[in-house]
Image: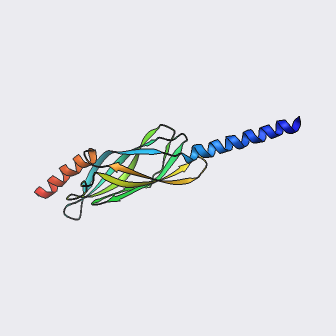
Amino acid sequence: MVGAVLGGLGVSELRDSREERERHASVALVAVPLSMSGGGSDVSGVLQLDGQLAVTNAGQAPITVRAATGQGPGAQVRDTGASRLLGPGDTGPIDVELRFECATAFDSGLLPMRFSVETDDRQVIEIDYPVALGGGVWQVRAEQACARTSVG
């Protein structure tokens, strides 16, 4: 009888451990441009700005967003080095540095991004997620800034 109880406990712990690993393996996030400010450039037709991405943890376990980088035709985005802890379903801003070439930054509409996230069991996972550039706050503000710089 004792063996059956211990065996049952072992199977239960194995199942719980496997379910927890699967829960951590199903890391998912959503990111959208949130804001941008400041700006300037040493090169004509290129903007360097500060911005924020709104990142949502669409998974079932807490994650820490450790890094975010993206590069596409005429556009570069990189985080400022600050990590962000997000519980399941939570949304929080990530500070980023933006570099846009006025002539081409928004032609593709999507910016390929890579996020490095850490699960609460200290596993680091890389996630690719394209961020929409077209029609959003970054495009509107960048186009306004580009128009101002081309007038002068």
* 59 to the left or right of 131: right
Task: Give the total number of marks visible in the rendering.
Answer: 0
* 22 to the left or right of 97: right
47 or 137, which lies in front? 137
* Farthest left residue in view: 151
Whole-percent x and y of residue 65?
48, 49
Whole-percent x and y of residue 18?
66, 45
Whole-percent x and y of residue 82?
45, 52
Which quadrant of the structure image shows residue 67? bottom left
* Farthest bottom residue in view: 43
Location of the C terminus by quadrant is bottom left
Which quadrant of the structure image shows residue 101? bottom left
* Farthest right residue in view: 1
Residue 134 visible within the image = yes
Location of the N terminus by quadrant is top right
* 127 to the left or right of 46: right
- Residue at 61% of width from left, 48% of height from top? 121
- Residue at 24% of width from left, 49% of height from top? 139
137 or 110, which lies in front? 110
Color theme of the render:
rainbow
- Residue at 58% of width from left, 53% of height from top? 123
Residue 79 visible within the image = no
